[in-house]
Image (cartoon, rainbow, N blue to C red):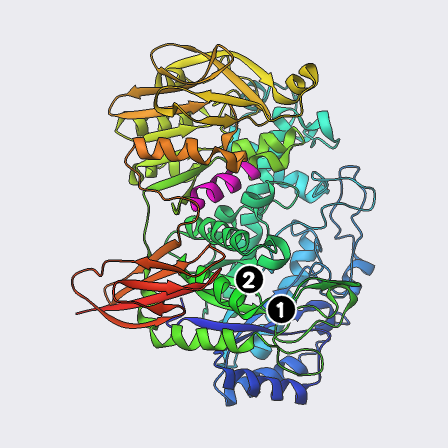
């Protein structure tokens, strides 16, 4: 949606410096090479009394941005609603006990006002639309505005309300409940059909209530459907926000939102932020990335975190652009805590990995250190005294390189490995119902990281795309935590393997259906034909350790194609009876892993959640080798490519603690035009320890 790469910085939100200081700072960042600033408007500051607006500071920023040719994106912080709205109207979310979630603040910290008003409430909707209409009517005329952001770190916060109710606390108000009933009516048509599928016996639609307890109270089909409803509701809210902006913006400028710790990283609830759903109605999409805050102090893990997050967003959005919508640009702080400051080398690594995995725009977080205690003295490319930080030069130097080769960086497409990780929200919802949200998220995250250790970059493919037969574009598909699925989903997997695909599954495939009810057997929905086995028993790892008094990790023994490997168990061990497949793993004398040929393809099922442990590197590597997927040892440099009709860019990251040399072959038809980082050799490049490099070729 933006013709050029975006090199932006989060520039202003209330409270902040006065306008004259902001103008000086804008001059500074313009000279540093930034081409965009993002302003986070805060509703509570700008409509202090109903119908009385205060846009003067933002008006001054926009006017000056136009003078110095600096683009602007406006972020609407509608969750940070003004106090008068709460004072005069009951627009609160309701927790599971039907109590108002009254955690409101006029400040953007700590969570941009979230959860804010309930966007199913017509009074809240009208108030927000009146404000956005007034804002765009007054300020939308400024040509410096190039786009809108309608949901900062889109999610339902806080995770806990004041009563300690978790996860299912949002939202149980009458408006949301009525919308849920309508959602059920649209899905099931008749009450008789709903009763049959959900194992209920309601006599009237109005009798339907949400499951308001915790723990076991969530373990029923109706609660399962409420989770599906909440996931779709996030898209409805995002779509409403976009439609609202488009309604008032005559120029129809692009609209975006972004997530933080989305479903792939933290589970489906209580935030309900599924990238696939949130991105559906947006013109472009992104994520927050804080690699030395939320990722790790260890350089390799920082890049795993970035690659995982960006690959998730990129896979969710299809052809749309992905932004690093908040990219750590300083040292986080909170209260009296001070996280370590980033080094210039780390800043280069983070930005390189973003571009290597397909990011087309950056918003560095943020331009000046925070002053509010929640993130006091944190972030910033200049400190609170206005002095630039040591790592700024590294960032601006890299930006200069990207701009020089922008035709490739902007148009380049991420090279695919032919490997994908399936994302089935049914399993995420089941994990939430069982109080194990992290289990589903950790399965995909760790599997992605283990594959990255082998230099195998992967896509993610969501249930909705699997049902559209899009698995066929991948040679190998992994099924992490495949415990819950529908018959339709299982049939799509069957067709994929039958037509020549390679399916690699963790334990317990389809042991539950899409409503979180047990199937008759595992693998369910006739997937036993695909995997060549049936469940014999399921053992819980912790109980085995308790009974045997061991603290050692329990290992499966590799057999056949996995001979010579051991497989660390996690959570469960599923044992199998062979019905046609070959044994590839055992627990004691029982079969705990099976390989099978089905149609033109093959399947693997390993009787544990093998993706949870990096010690299963050798097992996964052997399976990939057997299926012709090239991989490398852990200390091999990470390599990722962007390709376009203009040329190619190859990105490297040296995992070693010492300088390393890497040789590469230059493709026919390409001319070397530049590089950043490392030192070119006759046949390749030398890269310093824990550092990144990029080499660019143009086509002739």
Instruction: Measure the alpha-carbon separation of dots 2 and 1.
Output: 34 Å
User: How would you rate the neighbour count of disc 2 (Cα within 10 Å): few for under 14, some for 14-19, many for 20 or more?
Assistant: some
- SS assignment for the magenta stretch, majority: helix
Tell me the quadrant of the picture where the C terminus can be found.
bottom left
Q: Is residue 200 above or below residue 69?
A: above
- The answer to if 597 sits in the magenta stretch is no
| Residue lying at 25% horizontally and 63% vertically, measured from the top left | 683
Q: Residue under circle 1?
A: 330
Q: Is residue 644 above or below residue 490?
A: below
Res. 283 visible in picture: no
- In the drawing, what numbered circle is on residue 244? 2
Q: Nearer the viewer, residue 494 or 398?
A: 398
Q: Which residues are magenta?
A: 442-453
- How far across and down, in percent of the image, does residue 100 sit? 80, 47
Tell me the quadrant of the picture where the N terminus can be found.
bottom left
| Residue lying at 73% horizontally and 48% vertically, measured from the top left | 93
* Res. 290 image quadrant: bottom right
Q: Secondary structure at mark 1?
A: loop
């Amino acid at each position: 949606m933006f013709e050029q790469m975006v090199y932006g910085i989060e520039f202003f939100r209330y409270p902040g410096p006065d306008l004259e200081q902001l103008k000086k700072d804008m001059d500074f960042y313009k000279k540093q090479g930034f081409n965009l600033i993002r302003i986070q408007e805060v509703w509570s500051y700008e409509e202090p009394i109903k119908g009385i607006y205060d846009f003067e500071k933002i008006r001054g920023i926009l006017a000056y941005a136009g003078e110095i040719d600096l683009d602007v994106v406006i972020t609407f912080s509608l969750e940070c609603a003004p106090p008068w709205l709460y004072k005069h109207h009951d627009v609160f979310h309701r927790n599971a006990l039907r109590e108002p979630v009254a955690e409101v603040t006029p400040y953007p910290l700590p969570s941009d006002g979230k959860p804010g008003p309930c966007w199913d409430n017509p009074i809240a909707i009208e108030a927000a639309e009146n404000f956005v209409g007034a804002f765009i009517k007054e300020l939308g005329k400024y040509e410096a505005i190039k786009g809108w952001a309608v949901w900062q770190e889109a999610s339902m916060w806080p995770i806990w309300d004041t009563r300690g109710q978790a996860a299912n606390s949002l939202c149980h108000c009458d408006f949301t409940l009525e919308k849920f009933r309508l959602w059920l009516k649209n899905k099931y048509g008749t009450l008789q059909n709903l009763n049959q599928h959900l194992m209920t016996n309601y006599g009237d639609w109005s009798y339907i209530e949400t499951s308001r307890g915790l723990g076991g109270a969530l373990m029923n089909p109706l609660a399962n459907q409420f989770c599906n409803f909440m996931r779709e509701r996030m898209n409805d809210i995002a779509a409403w926000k976009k439609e609202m902006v488009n309604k008032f913006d005559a120029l129809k400028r692009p609209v975006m939102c972004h997530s933080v710790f989305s479903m792939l990283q933290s589970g489906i609830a209580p935030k309900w932020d599924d990238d696939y759903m949130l991105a559906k109605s947006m013109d472009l999409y992104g994520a927050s990335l804080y690699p030395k805050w939320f990722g790790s102090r260890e350089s390799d893990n920082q890049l795993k975190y970035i690659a995982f997050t960006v690959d998730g967003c990129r896979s969710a959005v299809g052809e749309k652009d992905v932004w690093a919508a908040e990219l750590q640009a300083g040292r986080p702080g909170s209260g009296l805590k001070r996280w370590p400051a980033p080094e210039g080398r780390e800043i280069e690594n983070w930005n390189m990995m973003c571009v290597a995995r397909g990011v087309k725009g950056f918003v560095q977080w943020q331009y000046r250190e925070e002053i509010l205690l929640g993130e006091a003295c944190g972030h910033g490319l200049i400190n609170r005294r206005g002095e630039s930080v040591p790592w700024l030069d590294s960032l601006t130097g890299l930006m200069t390189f990207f701009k020089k080769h922008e035709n490739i960086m902007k148009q380049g497409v991420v090279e695919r490995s032919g490997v994908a990780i399936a994302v089935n929200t049914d399993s995420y919802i089941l994990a939430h119902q069982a109080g194990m949200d992290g289990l589903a998220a950790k399965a995909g995250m760790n599997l992605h990281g283990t594959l990255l250790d082998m230099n195998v970059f992967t896509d993610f493919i969501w249930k909705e795309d699997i049902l559209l037969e899009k698995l066929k574009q991948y040679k190998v598909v992994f099924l992490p935590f495949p415990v819950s699925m529908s018959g339709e989903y299982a049939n799509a997997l069957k067709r994929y393997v039958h037509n020549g695909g390679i399916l690699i599954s963790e334990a317990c495939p389809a042991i539950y259906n899409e409503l979180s009810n047990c199937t008759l057997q595992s693998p369910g929905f006739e997937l036993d034909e695909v995997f060549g086995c049936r469940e014999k028993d399921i053992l819980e790892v912790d109980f085995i350790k308790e009974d045997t008094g061991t603290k050692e990790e329990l290992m499966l023994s590799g057999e056949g194609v996995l001979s010579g490997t051991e497989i660390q168990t996690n959570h469960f061990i599923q044992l199998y009876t062979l019905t046609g497949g070959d044994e590839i793993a055992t627990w004691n004398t029982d079969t705990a892993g099976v390989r099978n040929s089905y149609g033109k393809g093959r399947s693997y099922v390993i009787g544990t959640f093998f993706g949870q442990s990096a010690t299963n590197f050798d097992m996964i590597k052997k399976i990939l080798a057997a299926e012709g997927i090239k991989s490398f040892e852990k200390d091999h440099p990470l390599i990722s490519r962007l390709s376009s009709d203009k040329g190619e860019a190859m990105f490297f990251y040296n995992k070693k603690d010492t300088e390393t040399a890497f040789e590469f072959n230059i493709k026919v038809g390409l001319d070397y035009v530049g590089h950043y980082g490392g030192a070119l050799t006759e046949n390749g490049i030398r890269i310093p320890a824990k550092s990144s490099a990029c080499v660019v070729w143009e086509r002739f």
